[in-house]
Image (spheres, helix red, strand yellow):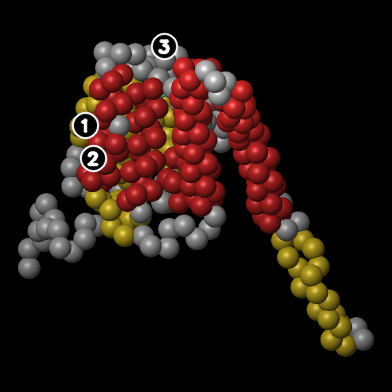
Amino acid sequence: AEPRLVAVRATRISPRLSLLVLRDITERERVEQMRRDFVANTSHELKTPVGAVSLLAEAIESAADDPPQVRIFAGRLTAEAARLSQLTSRIMHLSRLQSADELTEARVVSIDEVVAAAIDAHAIAAASAGVELVRGGERGLHVRGDSQVLSEALGNLVANAIAYSPSGSRVGVGVKLADGVVEVAVADRGIGIAEGDQDRVFERFYRADDARSRRTGGTGLGLSIVKHAVQRHGGEVRLWSRPGRGSTFTVRLPLTDPPDDIPRKKPRKK
Ligand code: ADP
């Protein structure tokens, strides 16, 4: 964007000379606008589950002399509360990722471990959806960053691949090195994403198929978290998809040398 300059201080140095201190407010305004939008659509998204929780609490109160009814309402209350708690922790996670001081503690991270953690975290979901998770590609690659943040981001992609795929299909997680960039691709043969939605799915709270996403427990924050987590690592996310054919999300991160205590594949000759 064009810089927009405002004067923050003017000092008269001599009758004919003044010193003007200027500041570019474009970036600050953009950040401020983002924050306002975030608060606005977060509040909007929280309204529905909060409303459901209070309605169910009222229902339980008025059904006090009907224990079977109370049990049903209480079960739904528990489910809504769990959803609310997932939503708030995702909102906090995203807000931390968007703030500047996230990755101060970057370490050398093993991609093998990140991929394994992402797959393990969703193995049960995959099994109950009848989806087979397959890990392929290169081993022994490293990047610099926060392994927790990375495995959660990759886990979001795996969770989506499972959620938007039919039973009996396969989800592949493949690792590849291309020109100093580690590429981790999560590929499914699921419902796919229409071309017009492909950029928008990375926006927070955006759902291409609202009803289905809510049914699968979606918050519309998963891909937004992925995008910010990967950008924090100096990387990017790419998406290929065709409706009815499937989707492939590729996380690209700069390669790093392995830590000193792990031997390289081909040790250098002395
Ligand atoms: P959600 O929690 O709703 O899954 P995400 O931010 O993770 O939110 O994804 C945003 C939307 O992108 C989803 O609601 C869904 O419509 C679409 N989407 C994400 N991943 C996939 C996928 N692997 N296949 C098809 N659609 C997907």
- Answer with left or right where residue 157 lies relative to residue 66: left
For mark 1, does the 10 Å Cα neighbourhood hold few (<14), some (14 to 19), or many (20 or more) residues? some
Q: Are marks 1 and 3 in contact (CB under 8 Å)?
A: no
Q: Are marks 1 and 2 in contact (CB under 8 Å)?
A: yes
Three-letter amino acid code at the position of disc 3: Gly
C-alpha separation, residue under disc 1 versus residue under disc 2: 9 Å
Query: Toward which corner of the image does residue 135 lie, by quadrant?
Result: top left
- Answer with left or right where residue 41 lies relative to residue 201: right
The residue beneath circle 1 is 135
Res. 169 visible in picture: no
For label 2, the SS is helix
Considering depth in this image, is 239 or 103 the residue closer to the camera? Answer: 103
The residue beneath circle 3 is 244
Q: Are marks 3 and 2 in contact (CB under 8 Å)?
A: no
Dot 1 or dot 2: first in sequence order is: 2
The outermost residue toward the left is 269
Disc 1 versus disc 2: nearer the observer: 2
Q: Which numbered disc covers residue 95?
A: none
